[in-house]
Image: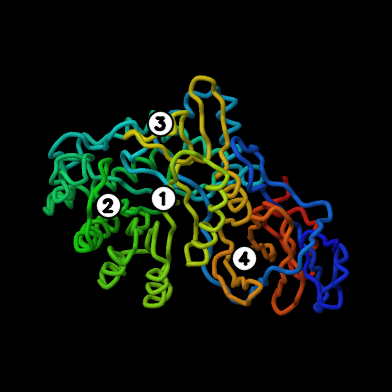
Amino acid sequence: MKLILPISLVSLASLVLPSTVQAQDGSTGHARVYYIANNLEGAVPEKPIREVTEPLVATEPSVGRIDINTAERHQTMTGVGAAFSEIGTLAVATLPADRQQALLHALFKPMDGAGFSFCRLPVGSSDFATSAYSYAETPDDYEMKNFSLARDEKSIIPVVLAARVVNPDLQLFASPWSPPGWMKESGKMDGGGGKIKESNRLRDEDLIYKAYALYFEKYLTGYLKHGIPIARLCPQNEMDCNPGYPGCVMEPAQTIKLVTEYLAPRFKASNVATEIWPGTFRESPKAPWATECMKNEAFRAAATGLGIQYYNGHLIEALAKDYPGLRFMHTEADCQNGKNTAQQARRRMGEMLGNFNSGCENYAYWNMLLDEKQKSGWGWAQNSLVTIDRVTHEIRYNPDYQPVCLVSRFVRPGDVRVTAAFHNANGIKFSTPVAAFGNARGETVILAQNQSDAPVVLDLIMNGTPGKLLLPANADCAAVFPAPGGDKNSKTSPADAL
C-alpha cells in the first residue's frame, strides 16, 4: 500500500512524495486539487466542487501517463456556458426573488458560483419554447415595421439581464431555429419532417434575403437596446436538419449566399459589431456542409469562425489543417433524454475535453434550465443543468451540472489550451481523456477523470519533469499547478472561494 498526496509534480529522486517538492528550476511542484463526485444520482449540491485536503491511498501501479508541454499553445478560450430557453426562463420567473438570486449566483458568479461566461440564445423559438414564434409575425413585412421582441421581454431578456448583473462579463452567441414562417416555402416555422421536406427552407428570393438580414439586424440592435450585446451570430441551427419543431434546411449554396451577399454587407453598412459564425454545422460524411462552404473565398472572408455541434472529429481536423487559423465554436452538447442520470453526467467530461482538444474555444451545454416537466414545447424530454418546480419552487441541480460547473470554474476566458496527451499503460495514445490550460496567473490547470471506485495513479511528465498524479475515486478533477516560483497558497485563483 502506497500513501500518495493528492497530485504532485516531483523529480524521480523524490518518490517519497512530500507535501511540496522542488523541481530542477527551483519552483514548487505541488498542486492544489479540486474535484466533483461523478457518481451522484438525483439532486447534486449547488456548490459541488471540493478540494482534496487529506492524503489519498492508491493500491495499484500507474495506469498510464500524461505528458504536458506548456510551450505548445493552441486556442484561446472564450469560456463555458449553456443555452437559455423560453421554457427555462419562464420557470425562473415563477421563483421568489431570493431564490432567483441564489440560482443566478450559483450559475454565473465567477469567484463563487459556476461562473458561466459564454452562453447561447435562441433567435425566436427553439424547440424549448412553449410554441413556435418569431419577431416578425406579419406576412410580407419586408421592412420589419411590426418587428417585436415582446415575447422575449417576458421571458428570456429579464433573466439574461439579471445574469449579467451577477457576471457583467458574460458573453453571448445566438442562432435561429427557423426564419419567420412567411419567409419559408412551407409558410410555417415548424412541422417539418417527411411531409414538407422539400419546402422547409428559406425562399430563394432577393426580397426575402434582404428582409431576413434586416430581421437579424433588428434582433441584435433590439437586444443591445435592452443592455444585452450579442457577440456572435450563427445564421441557422442544424441547417442539415428537417425537424417537426422549428427548423430550416439551408444547404451550402444558400448559406454562402445569405452570409456573403446579405448578412455581411448589411452588418458592415449598419455598423453591427456582432461577428458572423456560420453554423451550427453537424459536420459528417453525409453532410460535410462546413467543408463545402469553406471552399468559397467570400464565405471565408465573411466568417469569423465556424459554429459546430455533434461533429465528426476527423472532418474538423481536416478543416483546421486546410485552413490554418480557422476558429471553432462549440454550439450544443448532447441533449440526452431527460433522465438526468449520473452515468450520463460521467460522459460530459469526455465530451468537453474532446471538444477542447479538437480545437473548440468553448463548451456550450444545451438546456441550462427547464421546468418540472423536463420537456420541449413539442413533447420530448431532454436533460438540463437545473430543474425548477414552478409549484413548489424547488430548485434541483442535476448531475450534469457538476462537471460543467467544474470545467467552467477552471477554464476561463483568455486561458490558452496547451498540449496534453494521455497514454494508457500499454503505451497507446489517446487524445481526449485529459486537457490542460495555461492562464494569466502563470498557472497550469490539468483536467482529468477517474471513473473507478478507487484512486488511480498516473505518471505525469510536465515540461520534461517526471512526477506522479493521483485521481480520487469516482471524480472529475482539476489540478492547479502554480506558476514557476509561485505560491501554491496564493489566493488569486478562481478556486479560492471554494
Please state which of the two labelled residues, at mark 1 or mark 4, is closer to the viewer. Answer: 4
Residue at image location 63% in from the left, 48% down from the top = 38
- Residue 217 locus on image (x, y percent): 29, 48
Please state which of the two labelled residues, at mark 2 or mark 1, is closer to the viewer. Answer: 2
Decide: is 32 above or below 391: below
Decide: is 211 above or below 17: above
- Residue 388 locus on image (x, y percent): 51, 29
Q: Distance between the residues labelled 4 and 3?
A: 37 Å
Q: How far apart are marks 3 and 2 (CA)?
A: 27 Å
Q: Which amino acid does label 1 sit on?
A: Phe
Q: Residues within 10 Å of mark 2 (few under 14, many from 20)?
A: some
Q: Distance between the residues labelled 2 and 1?
A: 20 Å
Q: Is residue 367 left or right of residue 461?
A: left
The label shown at residue 155 is 3
Out of 438 and 221, give the one closest to the viewer. Answer: 438
- Count of marks, rendered view: 4
- Residue 449 locus on image (x, y percent): 63, 58
Q: How crowded is mark 1: few (under 14 residues within 10 Å), some or many (20 or more)?
A: many
Q: Is mark 4 on a helix, strand or loop?
A: strand
For marks 1 and 4, the one nearer the N-term is 1
Q: In which quarter of the image is residue 195?
A: top left
Q: What element carries label 2?
A: loop
- Per the image, the residue denoted by label 1 is 173
For marks 4 and 2, the one nearer the N-term is 2
Query: Are the two marked residues, 2 and 1, in contact with CB atoms closer than 8 angstroms?
Result: no
For marks 4 and 3, the one nearer the N-term is 3
Q: Which amino acid does label 2 sit on?
A: Cys
Q: What residue type is labelled 3?
A: Ser
For marks 3 and 2, the one nearer the N-term is 3
